[in-house]
Image: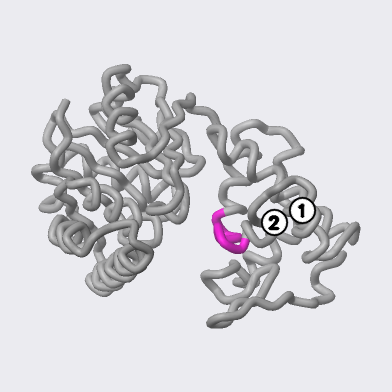
């Protein structure tokens, strides 16, 4: 099917990035969020990121202006998805919230509309169960920052129609992304592999084997990772990391997926990484410095 009208649910970091790439590729995008101020912030972020692309010579002024012109905003899901060919949900990683949203989308979107979730770990099959169109529900997991990262992890639910998968694969290529199709098991592939590594790095810190800087340096220089696992955890959000580890632990029932107590304590204390200004590192405008805290040991 031809995709022309796209609705994006959620105007946070992932939502504004997803809206950006669709609009830049020429699609008409409705960005939906219940908070008007969040929509205003998202549009400002998109404009700033487009300006950065323009200054680097990767887009023209015409592309910048057409991208912004392709985006409209809406605070009502019912109105925002009424003419959509595709909806991409990018709300908070909370299963109850996503089920509620997909039930609302199913009631409001046209019968032919594809419903995609940007979830990083929650079962697509479970999300699809909240709808009467499970064959048209699929995972479309973008990576952060969306305008820069090339991968789209596409997740087939149990009932996802093969033609829907083919449509989303082709669409991802239109966005200048590289699609990779996986099946619906906890954590899919990206986070089934990544999160236990991050959790093990946190355990190494918790057990006093090495410090924050040492762990990140070894993984960057020894394994050619562009970012150490603890810095990456801060960037993702420690609350998100904990949520995904809990999904893995619950889904597989294997102790190897149990989240490190240090991760649990940091999230409980509100130390969430970049978003809160403090995690394994502290973050201030224009600088980054290591936290030296006795709380990083048993």
Q: Is residue 224 left or right of residue 159?
A: right
Question: Which quadrant: the C terminus?
Answer: bottom right
User: Of residues 188 and 186, which is closer to you in this image?
Assistant: 188
Q: Position of residue 168 (x, y in %)?
A: 30, 30
Q: Residue at x 42, y 41 (%)?
A: 141
Asked if residue 74 shows in the view, the reply is no
Extent of the magenta region: 234-240
Q: CA distance from mark 2 to mark 1?
A: 9 Å
Q: Position of residue 118 (x, y in %)?
A: 39, 44
Q: Is residue 238 left or right of residue 275?
A: right
Q: Residue at x 52, y 70 (%)?
A: 275
For label 1, the residue is 221
Mark in the foreground, 2 or 1: 1
Q: Position of residue 99 (x, y in %)?
A: 35, 43
Label of residue 98 in the image: none
For label 2, the residue is 228
Question: Which quadrant: the N terminus?
Answer: top left
Q: Quadrant of residue 187?
A: top right
Asked if residue 60 shows in the view, the reply is yes
Q: Residue at x 44, y 43 (%)?
A: 150
């Amino acid at each position: 099917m031809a995709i022309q009208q796209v609705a994006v649910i959620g105007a946070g970091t992932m939502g504004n990035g997803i809206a950006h790439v669709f609009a830049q590729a020429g699609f008409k995008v409705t960005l939906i969020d219940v908070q008007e101020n969040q929509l205003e912030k998202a549009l400002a972020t998109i404009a700033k990121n487009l300006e950065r692309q323009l200054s680097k010579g990767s887009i023209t002024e015409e592309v910048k202006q057409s991208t912004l012109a392709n985006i409209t905003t809406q605070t009502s899901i019912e109105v925002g998805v009424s003419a959509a060919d595709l909806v991409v949900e990018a709300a908070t990683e909370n299963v109850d919230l996503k089920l509620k949203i997909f039930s609302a989308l199913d009631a409001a979107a046209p019968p032919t509309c594809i419903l995609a979730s940007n979830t990083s770990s929650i079962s697509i099959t479970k999300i699809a169960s909240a709808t009467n169109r499970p064959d048209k529900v699929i995972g479309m997991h973008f990576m952060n920052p969306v305008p820069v990262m090339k991968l789209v992890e596409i997740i087939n639910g149990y009932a996802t129609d093969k033609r829907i998968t083919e449509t989303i694969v082709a669409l991802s290529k239109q966005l200048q992304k590289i699609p990779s199709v996986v099946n619906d098991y906890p954590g899919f592939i990206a986070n089934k592999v990544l999160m236990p590594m991050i959790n093990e790095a946190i355990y190494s810190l918790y057990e006093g084997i090495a410090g924050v800087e040492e762990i990140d340096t070894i993984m960057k220089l020894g394994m050619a990772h562009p970012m150490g696992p603890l810095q990456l955890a801060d960037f993702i959000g420690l609350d998100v990391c904990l949520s995904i580890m809990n999904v893995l632990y619950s889904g597989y029932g294997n102790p190897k997926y149990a989240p490190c107590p240090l991760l649990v304590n940091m999230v409980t204390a509100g130390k969430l990484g970049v978003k809160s200004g403090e995690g394994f590192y502290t973050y201030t405008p224009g600088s980054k410095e290591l936290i030296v805290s006795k709380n990083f040991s048993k």
